[in-house]
Amino acid sequence: MGTTPSQYVLQTRVEAARRQLERTEKGLKQVAVAAGFGNVDVMRRAFVRLLGITPRRYRELADHSTGE
């Protein structure tokens, strides 16, 4: 697969959080817990590392792309 097990888990958690940010109105804390992150700060660091953007900004951009 070309990735370590920990990288795979991190990518999977970020993807789960992305889907929730796009499709729900859950708060960042709820999204972080549901996606398997220990807290919002851990999720934020993972987003910045993998996507170059914070979860809050990701949600803002997703909302704009759907016309909300």
Image (spheres, rainbow, N blue to C red):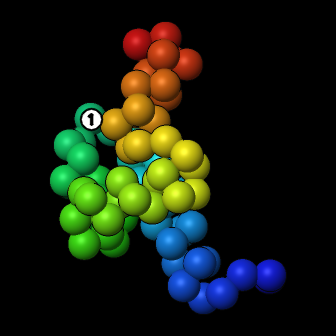
Q: Where is 29 relative to 33, above or below?
A: above
Task: Indicate the secondary structure of the residue bearing disc 1.
Answer: loop
Residue at x-position 41% and y-position 54%: 17
Q: Would you say residue 34 is visible in this rendering? A: no
Q: Which of the image's four quarters has the C terminus?
A: top left
Q: Where is 9 relative to 33, above or below?
A: below
Q: Where is residue 13 in the image (x, y as percent from the top left)?
A: 46, 66
Label 1 Cα neighbours within 10 Å, binned few <14 / some 14-19 / many ≥20 = few
Q: Position of residue 11 (x, y in %)?
A: 57, 67
Residue at x-position 48% and y-position 51%: 48
> Does residue 10 appear left or right of residue 21 in this picture?
right
> Does residue 32 appear left or right of residue 29 in this picture?
right
Amino acid type, callout 1 = Glu
Q: Position of residue 12 (x, y in %)?
A: 54, 68
Q: Would you say residue 5 is visible in this rendering? A: yes
Nearest the camera: 57 or 66? 57
Nearest the camera: 16 or 6? 6
Residue at x-position 40% and y-position 25%: 60
> Does residue 49 appear left or right of residue 4 in this picture?
left
- Residue sitting at the far top: 67
For label 1, the residue is: 25
- Residue sitting at the far right: 2
Say how many tags the image has.
1
Give the quadrant of residue 38.
bottom left
Nearest the camera: 10 or 17? 10
Q: Position of residue 24 (x, y in %)?
A: 33, 38
Q: Which of the image's four quarters has the N terminus?
A: bottom right
Q: Where is 10 relative to 65, above or below?
A: below
